[in-house]
Amino acid sequence: MKRFFAFLGTIIFSTGSAFAADAPATFKVSEFTFKRPDKWEWVESTSSMRKAQLKVNDADKKNSAEVVFFHFGPGNGGGVQANVDRWFGQFEGPREKIGAKSEKTKIGKHDVTFVRAEGTYLSGMPGGARTPQPGSALHGAIIESDDGAVFVKMTGPAALVKSAENDFRKMIDSALK
């Protein structure tokens, strides 16, 4: 009987470890392989539009931000500026009020547009009901490619998004160098 419980304990421990190991350290979206920041959690997406999804927690795990990856293929998903405008449009108020900024740069052989905004984020599907979330921020990247752009968007409480910006940038850089 002791052997049975020891065996059962081994199975439970192994299974628990296996679940933790399921979170990939790297993952691919289109042609790019991203390195997931160590403290960021892997989230199984329930939407076929989302090619990958991560969760960033604050130190107390009371607040979290979401990081989503989209890829629609060549010529799909709209142009870079259309997406920048749409992302800024997910906040209440004019661009000056939300500190809307976009910056185009080149990393490796790819053009990348980084996007930032802060204020009241209107979560929800475009055209559907929106839930105002004051004190929020967005940090995004649009990576241009012949295979179609990859859109990466982090949204959540402003302080958390700001504190995660360096890890966000490193993750984007990891896929492009």
Image (tube, rainbow, N blue to C red):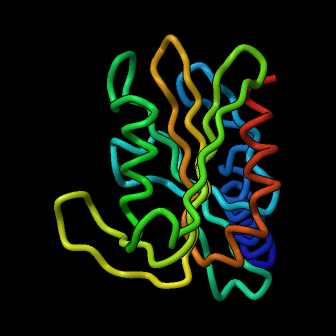
Left or right position of 38 against 153: right
Quadrant in the picture for the C terminus: top right
Which of 167 and 6 lies nearest the eye of the viewer? 167
State the image coordinates of residue 149 (x, y, percent, origin top left): 49, 26
- Rendered view: 170 above or below 40: above
Q: Quadrant of the N terminus?
A: bottom right
Q: Nearer the viewer, residue 60 or 87?
A: 87
Quarter of image, res 41 = bottom right
Q: Residue at x 51, y 11 (%)?
A: 146
The relative height of residue 32 versus residue 115 in the rendered view (above or below) is above
The percent position of residue 55, horizontal first and vertical second, equals 61, 64
Side of 158 where 146 appears, left or right: left
Q: Is residue 75 depicted above or below 67 in this figure?
A: above
- Determine whether, in the image, residue 172 is placed left or right of residue 102: right
Q: Residue at x 30, y 67 (%)?
A: 124
Pick out the residue farthest to the front: 96
Total numbered labels placed on residues in the image = 0
Question: In which image quadrant can residue 143 be found?
Answer: top right
Q: Position of residue 5 (x, y in %)?
A: 74, 76
Identify the residue at horizontal 71%, vertical 30% (top origin).
105
Please provide percent x and percent y for residue 173. 78, 34
